[in-house]
Amino acid sequence: MTEQPIVRRNAVNSGKHPLGVQERRSLDYGGTYICPVCRHGQISTLPLMDAFACNFCRHIFTADLRNQTVRVEDSSQPVTWRWNGRGWQGAATHVDVDLRIIIWLIGTALVTLPPGLIWLSSHTFPPMRGSAWYWFPTVWVCLAFLSHFLFVAWLFVEHYQVPFYITCKIRLQDWLGRR
Ligand SMILES: [Zn+2]
């Protein structure tokens, strides 16, 4: 909560109206823009470098001014965004599309296969009705599904760099660092 006024002031200084009323402007090294990763901080040029850095999530970006794009450099995924004059648009490449299909396939398999196998075995060899451990396979299937789902969900928000997740992660790191 204490960061809000500072962010507002930065937003006004960078020519961005707090209510979102802003003129179209092109991407150049002199400007300050909202960060495409965390959607919370501002990116501006690093001194003596043709690169942008965010004042909140600390990601580093290189810019292609001719195509009006920036690319995040310190991430496992070199994601690119296009500046349309007011905001950022994700610019997908062919490599990203292929990788996305593979990630979705693996994700689906990871979530469905383990609980499916446990369910199948408990269905094929059901525990005796009325026995003390009759409930166990159902709980085990639910646990397997939940744990795998959480794991895959975490991989997905990391891969897509979901702004809400990134903001939460940085807040948590700040909070842990302050203790
Ligand atoms: Zn950022």
Image (tube, helix red, strand yellow):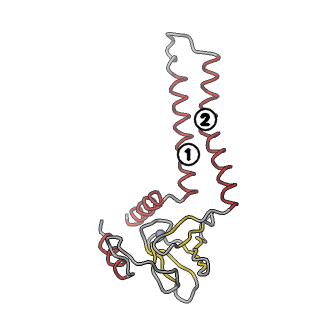
Which residue corresponds to the image point at 58% horizontal and 57% vertical from the top-left? 159
Which residue corresponds to the image point at 63% horizontal and 66% vertical from the top-left? 78
Q: Which residue is mark 1?
A: 151
Q: Nearer the viewer, residue 96 or 42?
A: 96
Marks 2/1: CA distance? 13 Å
Q: As shown in the figure, which amino acid type bears the numbered disc 2? A: Thr
Q: Nearer the viewer, residue 131 or 109?
A: 109
Q: Earlier in the sequence, mark 2 or mark 1?
A: 2
In this rendering, the answer to whether 132 lies above or below 169 is above
Q: Which residue is mark 2?
A: 112
Q: Residues within 10 Å of mark 1 (few under 14, many from 20)?
A: some
Q: Nearer the viewer, residue 75 or 131?
A: 75
Q: Residues within 10 Å of mark 2 (few under 14, many from 20)?
A: some
Q: Element at badge 1? A: helix
Quarter occupied by residue 109:
top right
Residue 49 picture location, percent across and down: 57, 86
Q: As shown in the figure, which amino acid type bears the numbered disc 1? A: Phe
Label 1 near ligand 1 (CB < 8 Å): no
Residue 170 picture location, percent across and down: 44, 63
Total labels drawn:
2
In this rendering, the answer to whether 111 lies above or below 62 is above
Q: Element at badge 2? A: helix
| In the displayed structure image, the side of residue 101 where residue 54 appears, left or right | left
Which residue corresponds to the image point at 45% horizontal and 80% vertical from the top-left? 32
Residue 105 picture location, percent across and down: 66, 44
Quarter occupied by residue 174:
bottom left
Q: Quadrant of the C terminus?
A: bottom left
